[in-house]
Image (cartoon, grey):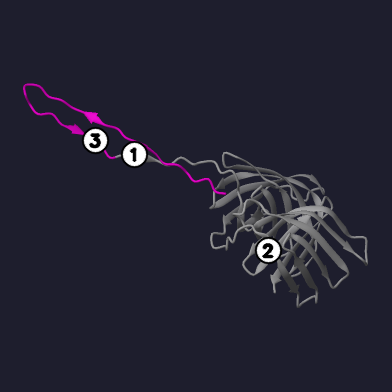
Amino acid sequence: MVVLATLTTALYACGGGGGGGASSSTTTPAAVVTTPTTPATSAVGPYNGTINDGTNNLDLTSFISQNNQYASYSGAGYSIYLGKINLKDNNITSALTDYSATSSNTIHLKAASIGSSTLSGALVPTTSISATDTYTAGVSNYHSNPYQIKLKFLTDSAIMGSSFQNLMGNYTAIDSGTGESLKFVITGAGVISGSDNKGCTYSGQATVSNGQSNIYELNNVSVSCANNNYIISNGLGVIANQATNIFLIFGDTNHAEGLILTKN
């Protein structure tokens, strides 16, 4: 929900007078209108922009739920960031878990946790986010310099409303390069189940926020693969319903994944 700014109008009047029977007049200058910035209660929305690592500008796609769950992925299979946004007076802070890609293609990014970082910056509601991501702990020298993040709110995104009726359906995806395929089903209660052709299964639960956003929170996400010991347990993230595609970004303390699926 976007909190609309209020308008405060201040009127000033000046009076003048004369003596000796001369006429008097009052001059009223034009009204002065001020538009204070009203703090937003949520940064909800889809965003797209860049993250600069000091050398390169990498694409960054981010989603923020109504309850300020943050999930993003960057740079053609480069990394994933997950966390919870704290928002006060349009200032953003967040403790993020950072994940570095272990494999990626056009539909599926897998990543492993490499540490944590702190996000801090400013929100212009329904317009933009400018922030700095500072690495705080984990793999030595992963990124010693703060990353600069610039995001624009996607105003052309189809905000269809948070409803399981909008989300339910069958979804698939195929990467022609690797041959990987994904099949998912989302029920009318927001229950998610899926599998790939490499022996992995997925489950989770979507949560409707306040009915005004097409970005849902993901809870209790589990991933298990029959041919290895790779698992995600009790993962958190977001699912974004963008017209004919959905984006799922989720993870636990060890691993994270990003999926792009098409509705059948």
User: What x and y, as percent, mark residue 90?
Assistant: 57, 42
Give the residue number, with chain letter if any, for mark 1.
32
Q: Residue furthest left?
A: 21
User: What x and y, as percent, mark residue 239?
Assistant: 70, 59
Q: Amino acid at mark 2?
A: Leu
Mark 2 to mark 3: distance in Å? 57 Å
Secondary structure of the residue carrying numbered label 3: loop
Secondary structure of the residue carrying numbered label 2: helix
In this rendering, the label closer to the viewer, 1 or 2: 2
Query: Foreground: 55 or 42?
Result: 42
The answer to which quarter of the image holds residue 112 is bottom right
Give the residue number, with chain letter if any, for mark 2.
167
Q: Is residue 134 above or below residue 29?
A: below
Residue at the image position 49 percent from the left and 41 percent from the top: 37
Mark 1 to mark 2: distance in Å? 47 Å
The answer to which quarter of the image holds residue 32 is top left
Q: Is residue 57 left or right of residue 182?
A: left
Q: Amino acid at mark 1?
A: Val
Q: Residues within 10 Å of mark 1 (few under 14, many from 20)?
A: few
Secondary structure of the residue carrying numbered label 1: strand
Q: Is residue 44 above or below residue 223?
A: above
